[in-house]
Image (cartoon, grey):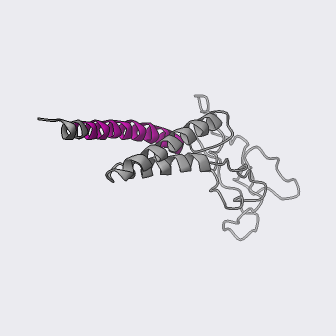
Amino acid sequence: MTYPPPPPDQSGQGGFQYDPYGSQPGSQPNPSQPQQPGYQQPGYPQPGYSQPSQPQQPGYGPAPQLPPQAPGYPPAYPGAPGYGPQLPKGQAIASMVLGIIGVAGLCIPYVGSFAAIVCGIIAAILGGVSLKKINAGQAAGKGQAITGLVLGIIVCAIAVIILIALGSLLAAFGTASTATY
């Protein structure tokens, strides 16, 4: 690939002068400025040089887009597209938190199982409702909603198993105490 020669020195001092308007190749020569011998305007073929035999390669295309704007900050420059309104995700977060509390409640004997069932049921319901809103595009927080739904179901299942085991254990001791010999 050949590059055009530098623009001619028009100051008459023999050095390079910066052109603030950026003479681009293909621009028209200025007739009011005299041509210096040995120099050719950029964009015009020079004598003794031939055009390249292979076709020019296409450019790289448009410039890459800017990264997305961080939420809560003003646009990066005037006219920059900002974010739209933030979608609510309170139900999804509440579902996840109640699911985690339900898992922690399973570790507390007796009373924890009842609290875990309540937290698990509420977490599963909130997770399901939140997922329905997310799929309709009315809310955000899909990860939290799925986490709350799954934890709520698991907590309910484990708590029911614990309560059945506890009830059968108490029933076994209850019948053993009433047995006569």
Quarter of the N terminus within the rendering: top right
Which residue is most to the right? 32
The reply to whether residue 50 is in sight is no
The vertical placement of 86 against 126, above or below, is below
Picture quadrant where residue 140 is located: top right
| Residue at image coords 27%, 37% | 171
Q: Is residue 63 left or right of residue 117?
A: right
Tally of numbered discs = 0
Quarter of the C terminus within the rendering: top left
- Of 165 and 52, which appears nearest the observer? 165
- Of 67 and 25, which appears nearest the observer? 67
- Of 28 and 135, which appears nearest the observer? 135
| Residue at image coords 49%, 47% | 96
The reply to whether residue 117 is in sight is yes
Q: Is residue 31 left or right of residue 178?
A: right
Q: Position of residue 34 (x, y in %)?
A: 82, 58
Which residue is most to the left? 181
Q: In this view, does 58 lie to the left or right of 95?
A: right
- Of 154 and 58, which appears nearest the observer? 154
Q: Position of residue 129 (x, y in %)?
A: 60, 37
Q: Where is residue 104 in the image (x, y as percent from the top left)?
A: 37, 52
| Residue at image coords 59%, 33% | 57
Does the magenta run of residues contain 151? yes
Find the magenta span and give its range: 143-172
The vertical placement of 78 against 85, above or below, is below
Does the magenta run of residues contain 52? no
Which residue is most to the front? 181
Which residue is most to the bottom? 13
Q: Where is residue 134 in the image (x, y as percent from the top left)?
A: 62, 38
